[in-house]
C-alpha cells in the first residue's frame, strides 16, 4: 500500500504542474480536465494515506502530524490552482506549498515505514 500512496502523490504533483501550466497558457478546457483528474487523485491520496495510518500508526503524534501536513499540502495544491485560474498572485502560496511539501515528505521518510535516509 505504501507504493500505491507514493505513486498517487507523485502523479498528483505531475498533474499539479501540468494544470498550472495549462492555466498559465490560457488553455482553460485542458486545465479544467487535468484539474478534475487531480481532484480524483486527492481522494486516492487521502484514502491510501488513511489506510496506512490505520494499519501502521501506534496512535502517536508523528503519524497524526504527517496526516495533518498531508491534508494541508493537498489544500495548498488546490488553492494554487484556484488562484491561478482566477489570475491572482500565487507567489506566497508557492513558498508555503514547497515548505509544507518538504516537511511532509521528510516526516514521511522519518517514520518507521518510510525509507531510512537519516
Image (cartoon, rainbow, N blue to C red):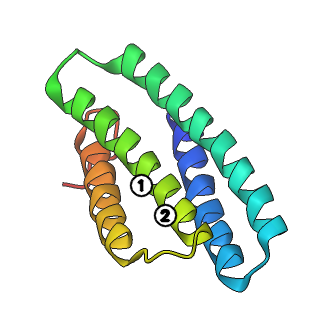
Return the mark for residue 80.
2
Secondary structure state at the residue bearing disc 2: helix
| Picture residue at 18% right of the left edge, 54% below the top | 118
On the image, the x and y values in percent for residue 69 come to 30, 43
Q: In this view, does 25 lie to the left or right of 92?
A: right
**Circle 1 residue:** 76
- Mark 1: which secondary structure? helix
* Residue drawn at 33 percent across, 33 percent down: 67
Give above or below for 105 relative to 31: above
Q: In this view, does 107 lie to the left or right of 34?
A: left
Q: Which residue is located at x 37 percent, y 42 percent?
A: 70
Q: Are marks 1 and 2 in contact (CB under 8 Å)?
A: yes
Q: Which residue is drawn at 41% across and 15% down?
A: 55
Residue placed most toward the observer, 7 or 114: 7
* Rendering quarter of residue 41: top right
Is 90 drawn above or below residue 25 in the view shown? above
Residue furthest out toward the right? 29
Amino acid at each position: 500500500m505504501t507504493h500505491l500512496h507514493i505513486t498517487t502523490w507523485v502523479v498528483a504533483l505531475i498533474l499539479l504542474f501540468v494544470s498550472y501550466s495549462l492555466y498559465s497558457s490560457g488553455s482553460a478546457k485542458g486545465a479544467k480536465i487535468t484539474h478534475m483528474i487531480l481532484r480524483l487523485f486527492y481522494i486516492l491520496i487521502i484514502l491510501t494515506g488513511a489506510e496506512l495510518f490505520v494499519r501502521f500508526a501506534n496512535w502517536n503524534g508523528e503519524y497524526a502530524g504527517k496526516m495533518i501536513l498531508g491534508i494541508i499540502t493537498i489544500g495548498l495544491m488546490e488553492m494554487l490552482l484556484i488562484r491561478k485560474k482566477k489570475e491572482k498572485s500565487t507567489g506566497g502560496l508557492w513558498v508555503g506549498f514547497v515548505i509544507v511539501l518538504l516537511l511532509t515528505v521528510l516526516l514521511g521518510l522519518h517514520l518507521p515505514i518510510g525509507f531510512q535516509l537519516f
